[in-house]
């Protein structure tokens, strides 16, 4: 299989489960390049199993943190994600697991999926992206209405489940500056912390 399902970035393992996403963020790295550190992130097909992911994981040097994050929304592949996470936790309980997500999973799956992640996932990082719905829609270009409210509800659900929850925003996209203080206030009110990510113009090389 030529699909890149697991790859290394700065010495840590990342898992690339899908190229599908319910957002089309204007600052997304995949708009500008096909690879991360030389590994092509575009999947030839998505007809793979959790074992296919595990097989690629086993070929990489173990890191102290593994993150579900690639060129798509990992929680769209919820069942595979849970199976892989369970395998990692059983074999390497010391390894911390994180999901980078757009926060749309509960809307997509039509249920609160967060309790299914409790005990498996140590940190959930949710792309808050903006301090207002108007700016969120401009930057994230979601595929459905009221997406910003869904994101905030997901953040709250994650926090309520006892999972360490982080909200992220991208700062400096083409000289654009975010209202960081307002974003921090929103994150804190939802039980999360805020992470400000600097925009990387040319992506990871």
Image: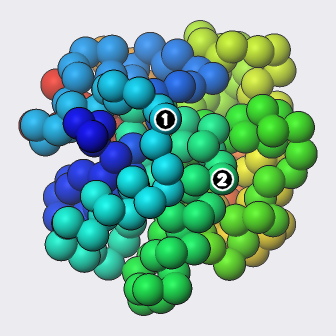
Q: Is mark 2 on a helix, strand or loop?
A: helix
Q: Which residue is drawn at 63% across and 38% down?
A: 76
**Which label sits in the foreground, 2 or 1?**
1
Disc 2/disc 1 C-alpha distance (Å): 13 Å
Residue 150 showing in the rendered view: no
Q: Residue at x 39, y 54 (%)?
A: 52
Q: Is 31 above or below relative to 100?
A: above
> If the image is split into quadrants, where does the C terminus sit?
top left
Left or right? Give the position of 68 relative to 123: left
Q: Is 139 above or below relative to 150?
A: above
Count the marks. 2
Estimate the x, y position of residue 81 in percent, counting from the top left: 57, 55
Estimate the x, y position of residue 92 in percent, counting from the top left: 41, 86
For disc 2, the marked residue is 79
Q: Which residue is drawn at 66% across and 53% down?
A: 79
Res. 108 image quadrant: top right
| Residue nearest the viewer, comparing 166 with 60 | 60
For disc 1, the marked residue is 47
Left or right? Give the position of 156 relative to 201: right
Q: Is mark 1 on a helix, strand or loop?
A: loop
> If the image is split into quadrants, where does the N terminus sit?
top left
Q: Residue at x 34, y 46 (%)?
A: 5
Sort mark 1 into few (<14), some (14-19) or many (20+) by Cα contacts within 10 Å: few
Q: Is 39 above or below relative to 144?
A: below
Residue 93 showing in the rendered view: yes
Estimate the x, y position of residue 27 in percent, counting from the top left: 39, 20
Res. 70 image quadrant: top left
């Amino acid at each position: 299989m030529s699909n890149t399902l697991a790859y290394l970035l700065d010495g840590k393992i990342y898992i690339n489960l899908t190229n599908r996403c319910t957002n089309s963020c204007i600052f997304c790295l995949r708009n500008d390049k096909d690879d991360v550190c030389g590994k092509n992130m575009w999947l030839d097909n998505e007809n793979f199993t959790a074992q296919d992911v595990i097989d690629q994981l086993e070929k990489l040097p173990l890191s102290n943190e593994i993150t579900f994050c690639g060129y798509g929304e990992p929680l769209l592949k919820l069942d595979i994600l849970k199976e892989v996470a369970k395998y990692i936790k059983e074999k390497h309980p010391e390894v911390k697991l994180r999901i980078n997500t757009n926060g749309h999973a509960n809307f997509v799956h039509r249920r609160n999926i967060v309790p299914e992640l409790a005990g498996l996932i140590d940190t959930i990082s949710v792309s808050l992206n903006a301090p207002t719905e108007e700016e969120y829609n401009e930057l994230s270009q979601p595929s459905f209405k009221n997406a910003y409210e869904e994101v905030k509800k997901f953040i709250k659900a994650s926090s309520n489940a006892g999972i360490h929850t982080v909200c992220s925003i991208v700062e400096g996209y083409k000289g654009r500056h975010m209202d960081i203080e307002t974003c921090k206030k929103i994150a804190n009110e939802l039980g999360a912390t805020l992470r400000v990510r600097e925009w990387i113009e040319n992506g990871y090389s």
